[in-house]
Amino acid sequence: MNNTKYVFVTGGVTSSLGKGIIAASLAKLVQERGYSVTIQKLDPYINIDPGTLNPYEHGECYVTDDGAETDLDLGHYERFLNIPTSQANNVTTGRIYQSVINKERKGEFLGKTVQVIPHITDEIKNRIQILGNTGEYDIVITEIGGTIGDIESLPYVEAVRQLQWELGEENAIVIHLTLVPYLAAAGELKTKPTQHSVKMLMQSGVSPNILVCRSEHEINDTIKRKLALFCNVKQQDVIQSLDAETIYDVPNLMFQEGLDYVVLEKLRLSTRKQPKLKAWNKFIEKHKNPTSTIEVGLVGKYVELHDSYKSITEAFIHAGAANKTKVNVRWIHSEELTPENAAGMLEGLDGVLVAPGFGDRGIEGKIAAVQYVRENNIPFLGICLGMQMAVIEFARNVLNLEDANSIEMNDSTSNPVINLMEEQKDVTEKGGTMRLGAWNCQLTQDSKAYDIYKDELISERHRHRYEFNNVYKEQIEAAGMKATGTNPKTGLVEIVEIPTHPWFVGVQYHPEYKSTVLNPHPLFVDFIKAALKQSKK
């Protein structure tokens, strides 16, 4: 018999209240209590996945080991829980409808009229329970994207209502995250938005079991009593969530409020083992009490929306704590960078990261940044497109191949040092067709990469169509840039280094996706260490 319990996290009043962080914090606490737990995200948009979305629309696209292009919240889940997610952890309306329509085309509904209820809601319920049915998890936490009242969220709320009825209230509960705003003119907190939000949820047939109330001010017992009375919950089930200094404080704040305790009580699970959070709090202690400060430049083309590089900035925080160093990020738009102004824009930086991206916009700025850090011995980390720009810059300015470029930017270049991957040449569809997920990489022993990873064979996550052109490998290596990591099956170059440079590494993969609080990524840790060394010069 499957004994998996389900916790659903919904949001009301406004978006961006932090459902993902609340879900991840609750998961961390129940994990510390000895339960196996995972989190999934249900996204109401009709895209199959965020892979084809502009980062300005949805922030970064997070990639799992099994090659799923997913919502950035899955990054939070992995960083908090220190366990990998998969395709099953992110479900979109597009994927739900695609599955139902495919079944209808195959005749699986035996002539029935296909409708939102029961066909769409049944598909949603199946997707919610996929993780639970594996038998691996005691608790599955499901975050429902969007805000209660959104038309696109209604089938998900209906699926939750049905699941609660089918599984029983001790097996499926709902946490409703809402806003209790403070009106300065009146000098008081207002509960009416929360009341309306809960009323709207109840009109859909779902009654929340727990209220988590975001606020800038303390929610006293009088307000909690009022919320409990009007929202049909017990006073102890009204949890305040005050603005935190960092997202990593939230598990401790939720523990103090007793969120994990009331959840386990409602699910009729033992609350005897207390969360210790020893390693977690050790990280927070180092993060909040740095002994040094450095400034690292992040050169990208989507820097107006910092969420476009969420995993990178979080990896900086993890690596900073490991080095007891505060990492200040200078956001540099690659479209504004030129060879003429690079010195001014990059002056004073202790390290530079050239970020991933797609398309030719801002490319020359990235190349100018690479040239400046290479010539001025500033620690450099290039990720995916950043690594490709390092190869192009080296080919142009060291090998004197003036028109060296990527086929992506100029398909008629006579020196395509970055080429379209062979298996990508017949691909016409955009969604989910790149080289995705975890791939092995063989490291050269006498290399910085080997010194960092301390292993010959590593596995990292990818998201790209273009690759280092091995036709130029011998020429590039002879000039001083070494290929120190390659895919053992295909020979694809994964890592380039310049051994004569203090710290110059470009990687085709995305190391940021695997950095967690308890396991900071070694590449980022060593990069920050090199930047710290640079700052002391």
Image: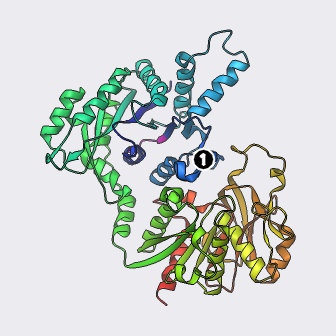
**Residue 453: x and y, percent?**
62, 69
Residue furthest bottom as drawn? 537
Q: Position of residue 424 (x, y in %)?
A: 80, 51
Would you say residue 44 sits in the magenta stretch?
A: no
Q: Considering only vertical position in the picture, is 131 above or below 363?
A: above
Q: Magenta residues, as a range?
A: 33-39
Q: Left or right of 168: which side holds 363?
A: right
Label 1 packing within 10 angstroms: few (<14), some (14-19), many (20+): some
Q: Residue at x 31, y 31 (%)?
A: 197
Decide if residue 65 is in sight here: yes
* Residue drawn at the location 63% of the way across and 23% of the way down: 100
Q: Which residue is depicted at the point 72% across and 62% down?
A: 441
Estimate the x, y position of residue 162 in percent, counting from the top left. Answer: 44, 20
Q: Is residue 324 left or right of residue 60?
A: left
Q: Secondary structure at mark 1?
A: loop
Horizontal and vertical percent position of residue 291? 37, 78
